[in-house]
Amino acid sequence: SQQGEEDPQALSIQEGENATMNCSYKTSINNLQWYRQNSGRGLVHLILIRSNEREKHSGRLRVTLDTSKKSSSLLITASRAADTASYFCATDAIDYKLSFGAGTTVTVRA
Amino acid sequence: GAVVSQHPSRVICKSGTSVKIECRSLDFQATTMFWYRQFPKKSLMLMATSNEGSKATYEQGVEKDKFLINHASLTLSTLTVTSAHPEDSSFYICSARTQPSTDTQYFGPGTRLTVL
C-alpha cells in the first residue's frame, strides 16, 4: 500500500528559483529515496537517505529526513527548465519493498 | 550505473489477447525484480515481487492469473497480461535489485500498454 504522501501536488516556479517538496509517511523505515520521472518515462534515482541520517546533498539537491515527524523534504536549488518533471518519494520499510508517494509535478518556467 | 531495459516500450493490442512484457538487467544479475503499474498522473503501485527461480509474490488485490510473472534467469523477468481488457491499459515499470536486501532498485524505462 502507498505510504508516502507528497505536498504540494504541483509546483510552478521560475528558472533560477528553488523548489521544495515534502513527503510524509506512516511507519518506520530503513531509508527514504527520491526519484524523478519525466513524462512517459521511467524513474531516475536521485538520492537515498537512511533512517539514521538527517540531511544529504547531491549537486543541486538537498534532502532532509525527520524520523520523529516521519517526513522528508527535497530541495532543488537554482532550478533549470530540465528539472521539469514529477518527483516521487519512496519509503523502504518492510521486506525491502518500495512504497511510493503520489508525487509532485514541478514545472520550471524559462 | 546498472541498466534495466524493457521490451516493448509500447504495445497496442485488442481486447482478449495476451501481452508479454520483458524486463532485463543488462549488466548485473538481478536476484529480485519488481513489477509496478502506474496510471496517468498517479503514483507507482507495486504489483508483485519476483525472485529468480521461485514463484512471484503478489500484492493484495493483484490477480495472479491475470498478471503472470516469470523470473526464469538472473537477468530476465517477464510479465504477461492475460486476456487483456481496456482497464488493463497502463504504464508498467519493472525494477531490479542485485540482492534482496540491498537498498538500490534500478528501474526500467517502462512499457505503455493500450488495450483497444
Image (spheres, coloured by chain):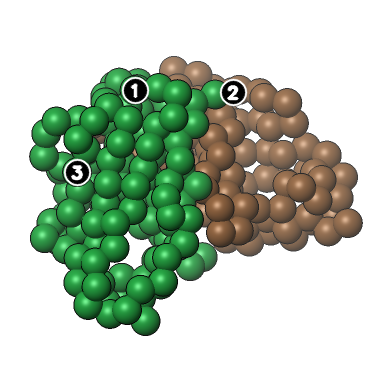
Chain colours: A brown, B green
Q: If you read the primary sequence from the N terminus, does the residue marked by circle 3 or circle 1 appear first?
A: 1
The local secondary structure at tag 1 comes to: loop
Q: Is residue A26 visible?
A: no
Residue at position x 29%, y 63% in the image? B19
Q: Position of residue B21 (x, y in %)?
A: 33, 53
Query: In which chain is the residue bearing label 2?
Result: A
Q: Amino acid at mark 3?
A: Asn
Residue at position x 67%, y 24% in the image? A58
Vertical position of residue B53 compared to residue B110: above or below:
above
Quick check: A82 left or right of B43? right
Residue A55 bears which disc, if any? 2
Q: Is residue B19 visible?
A: yes
Q: Which residue, given by chain and number where applicable, does mark 3 sit on?
A: B70
Q: Which residue, given by chain and number where applicable, does mark 1 sit on?
A: B29
Quick check: B66 left or right of A7? left
Q: Amino acid at mark 2?
A: Glu
Residue B113, image quadrant? bottom left
How far apart, in angstroms, are the residues tagged by discs 2 and 3? 39 Å
The local secondary structure at tag 2 comes to: strand
Q: Amino acid at mark 1?
A: Gln
Quick check: A10 left or right of B61? right
